[in-house]
Image (cartoon, helix red, strand yellow):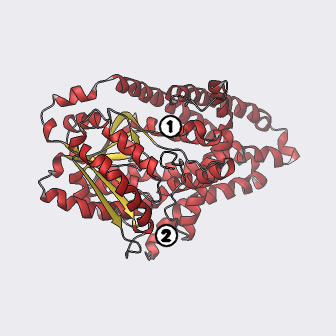
């Protein structure tokens, strides 16, 4: 899609802010080292305060998660007025996924406490993988169709105008094929909850029961998306340590957001009302980050009166897995870069907020600030804290080294970093409580100790799998080198081999 000059200007802003910060940090370390020392002290203190702010929300969210696991949501939901009218529509877009992965996902849906007969499943394939998709569905549909209220398949044609290959365009096509049939058959968009899942998503048995309970008890349920806890547990024991740390970091970030949902967008697998989807015209066809963008479509369509409702139950997905250590790290980098490509939402937000005269200014300001601040610190903080923060002390001229600030600051920074380690210890402890059961074939001794020790890799993952993918994504958008949708390799299908 061709961009206007104004759109290109907006696309340049995030990357320009990042590179200006990084370049100035290097230049000022040589020409104004004292300025840099003060900046580093303020920045590190700011980061420590962020961690102190982060930990209580993470612990509170973890506590709500533990409580949610113990509750019989199906029992509670079944007594609510309107329960019998609720239906669930689940989209499972797939491309080159193997049969065993899709079978396991369908099994998890079938085993839910919520009646499977009230669930409609859509397997959304791609024409670029049509032969493999038809082979899989020809085998699986006879096994599962009698268990659900409906089991549909769609095949998204390739090279349609105005599209990029990816999950969003596939979902858009699939919804346009299936939803009109369902509405004509009598399904009520106001009483239908849509879940957009990665095809490897294994839902908690009580997920749809909890989702139904929330939908029937919150105010204006069609004006909300519903976000579960995303765990990357399906193949966690077989994943490299750096992959595990990065994936747990994503889970903890999301759990923190769930504790303060007034400022969060949807991420990965989540749910929403069919009414909202129909109002906004379904998912966009030319963006990679469809999971967060669909929330923004609702926010803009309803002029700021749209929100996320937390679901403190897990949906479990695969970590990237290629069978080899170094390729798995490369796949992890690409996956995190794709998530960082959510920066593409910034130009869209500015343009749409400018046009929207009904959305309150404070709502626009809040969302724009949160978007740009999050992307900026994602890209810059690891380098400033762990790399550039030491540069002025290495290159400062001799006459400045006698200044008290130069002599005392390294000790101050060291203590700030020690205090910041509290976040690492909390994360490591909570990670142990989220581990899936150890598979029988995993025979490594001292597994718990290994999982604790892996957190020593955090500084490495903070830079390599934190800052670099974000810088990469924002630089690509700044230069107009747009990122396509990258499908990461995950589990091998042993069930169908």
Of helix, strand and loop, which one carries label 1?
loop
Q: Residues within 10 Å of mark 1 (few under 14, many from 20)?
A: many
Residue furthest out toward the right: 398
Q: The N terminus lies in which quarter of the figure?
A: bottom left
Find residue 261 and report its horizontal and vertical position in percent: 36, 39
Find residue 381 and report its horizontal and vertical position in percent: 61, 46
Q: Residue at x 63, y 49 (%)?
A: 328
Residue 396 visible (yes or no): no
Find residue 28 and report its horizontal and vertical position in percent: 72, 54
Of helix, strand and loop, which one carries label 2?
helix
Estimate the spatial distance between the alpha carbons at disc 2 and disc 1, rounded to whole Å: 40 Å
Q: Residue at x 25, y 35 (%)?
A: 114
Residue 270 visible (yes or no): yes
Find residue 412 and report its horizontal and vertical position in percent: 71, 31
Q: Residue at x 29, y 38 (%)?
A: 208
**Mark 2 or mark 1, earlier in chain:** 2
Q: Which residue is mark 2?
A: 9
Q: Which residue is mark 1?
A: 233
């Amino acid at each position: 899609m061709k961009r206007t000059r104004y759109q290109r200007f907006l696309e340049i802003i995030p990357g320009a802010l990042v590179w200006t910060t990084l370049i100035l940090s290097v230049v000022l370390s040589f020409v104004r080292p004292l300025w840099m020392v003060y900046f580093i002290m303020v920045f590190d203190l700011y980061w420590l305060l962020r961690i102190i702010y982060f930990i209580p929300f993470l612990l509170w969210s973890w506590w709500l998660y533990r409580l949610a696991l113990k509750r019989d949501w199906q029992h509670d939901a079944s007594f609510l007025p309107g329960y019998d009218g609720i239906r669930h529509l689940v989209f499972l877009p797939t491309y080159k996924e193997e049969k065993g992965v899709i079978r396991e996902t369908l099994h998890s849906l079938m085993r839910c406490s919520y009646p499977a007969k009230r669930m409609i499943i859509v397997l959304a394939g791609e024409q670029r993988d049509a032969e493999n998709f038809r082979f899989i569905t020809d085998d699986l549909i006879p096994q599962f169709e009698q268990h659900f209220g409906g089991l549909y398949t769609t095949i998204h044609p390739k090279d349609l105008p105005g599209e990029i290959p990816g999950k969003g365009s596939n979902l858009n096509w699939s919804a346009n094929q299936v939803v009109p049939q369902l509405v004509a058959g009598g399904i009520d968009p106001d009483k239908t909850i849509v879940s957009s899942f990665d095809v490897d998503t294994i839902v908690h048995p009580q997920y749809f029961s909890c989702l139904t309970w929330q939908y029937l008890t919150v105010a204006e349920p069609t004006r909300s998306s519903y976000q579960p806890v995303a765990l990357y547990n399906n193949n966690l024991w077989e994943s490299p340590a750096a992959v595990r740390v990065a994936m747990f970091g994503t889970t903890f970030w999301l759990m923190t957001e769930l504790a303060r949902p007034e400022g969060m967008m949807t991420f990965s697998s989540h749910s929403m009302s069919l009414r909202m989807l129909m109002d906004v015209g379904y998912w966009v066809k030319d963006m990679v980050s469809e999971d967060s963008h669909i929330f923004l479509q609702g926010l803009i369509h309803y002029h700021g009166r749209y929100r996320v409702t937390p679901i403190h139950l897990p949906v479990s997905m695969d970590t990237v897995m290629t069978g080899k250590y170094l390729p798995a790290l490369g796949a992890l980098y690409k996956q995190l870069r794709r998530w960082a490509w959510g920066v593409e939402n910034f130009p869209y937000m500015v343009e749409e907020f400018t046009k929207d005269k009904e959305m309150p200014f404070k709502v626009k300001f809040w969302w724009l600030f949160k978007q740009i601040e999050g992307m900026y610190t994602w890209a810059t903080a690891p380098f400033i804290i762990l790399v550039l923060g030491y540069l002025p002390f290495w290159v400062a001229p001799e006459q400045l080294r006698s200044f008290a600030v130069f002599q005392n600051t390294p000790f101050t920074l060291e203590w700030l970093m020690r205090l910041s380690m509290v976040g690492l210890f909390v994360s490591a402890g909570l990670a142990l409580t989220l581990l899936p059961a150890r598979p029988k074939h995993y025979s490594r001794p001292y597994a718990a100790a290994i999982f604790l020790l892996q957190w020593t890799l955090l500084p490495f993952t903070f830079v390599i799998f934190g800052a670099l993918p974000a810088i990469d994504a924002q630089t690509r958008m700044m230069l107009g080198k747009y990122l396509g949708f990258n499908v990461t390799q995950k589990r091998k299908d042993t069930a169908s081999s």
